[in-house]
Image (cartoon, grey):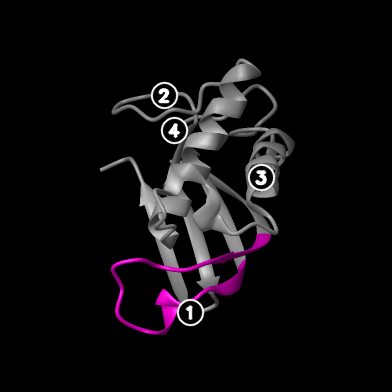
């Protein structure tokens, strides 16, 4: 199995509802995001996937979040946890690349490359992952 990963970042504010602690107050993070693609075979050029396509899609989705208050985005239902952010970014990458004719959606036994997880780091030591291959 081969795997590639690209990275992007964005800065945003949020607060967590139904949480008892300092994160219930408005605060910000410099998020780092990793998008992981895996697949069992390489293309004619010896690559799993063109890095530039994946990187462009990831950066476009992160750009939509950059310098926002994430609580203002309806998709997070007023509770933009790192887990929900990771799922949002995963779904955004899939949608953008499908428009370009690249299907990175995951299914068991798929022999083409698939986006199988997105990691969102709020800090260097705190990560949430949205993963679809299990």
Residue at 52% across, 73% down: 26
Measure how far apart labels 1 and 2 are at the Cα level.
34 Å
Q: Nearer the viewer, residue 46 or 62?
A: 62
Please identify the quarter of the rendering in which residue 34 is found.
Answer: bottom right
Label 2 crowd (10 A; few <14 / some 14-19 / many >=20): few
Measure how far apart labels 3 and 4 are at the Cα level.
32 Å
124 lies above or below 53: below
**Residue 125, how many percent across, how many down?**
48, 79
Measure how far apart labels 3 and 1 are at the Cα level.
24 Å
Mark found first going from the N terminus, 3 or 4: 4
Mark found first going from the N terminus, 3 or 1: 3
Question: Is the C-beta separation of discs 4 and 2 under 8 Å?
Answer: yes
Of tags 3 and 4, the one toward the viewer is: 3
Image disc number at residue 64: 3
Mark found first going from the N terminus, 1 or 4: 4
Judging by the rendered image, the residue that carries numbered circle 4 is 40
116 lies above or below 5: above
Judging by the rendered image, the residue that carries numbered circle 1 is 125
Magenta stretch bounds: 10-30
Label 4 crowd (10 A; few <14 / some 14-19 / many >=20): some
**Residue 17, how many percent across, how many down?**
35, 66
Image disc number at residue 111: 2
**Residue 14, how many percent across, how many down?**
52, 65
Q: Is residue 108 magenta?
A: no
**Residue 129, how many percent across, how many down?**
40, 57
Q: Secondary structure at mark 4?
A: loop
């Amino acid at each position: 199995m081969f795997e590639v990963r690209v990275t992007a970042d964005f800065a945003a504010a949020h607060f967590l509802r139904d949480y008892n602690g300092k994160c219930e107050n408005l605060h910000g993070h410099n998020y780092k995001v990793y998008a992981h693609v895996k697949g069992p075979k390489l293309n004619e050029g010896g690559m799993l996937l063109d890095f530039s396509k994946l990187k462009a899609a990831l950066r476009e989705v992160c750009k939509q979040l950059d310098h926002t208050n994430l609580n203002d985005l309806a998709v997070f239902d007023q509770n933009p946890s790192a887990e929900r952010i990771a799922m949002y970014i995963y779904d955004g990458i899939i949608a953008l690349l499908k428009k370009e004719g690249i299907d990175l959606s995951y299914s068991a036994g798929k022999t083409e490359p698939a986006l199988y997880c997105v990691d969102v780091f709020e800090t260097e030591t705190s990560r949430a992952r949205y993963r679809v291959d299990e």
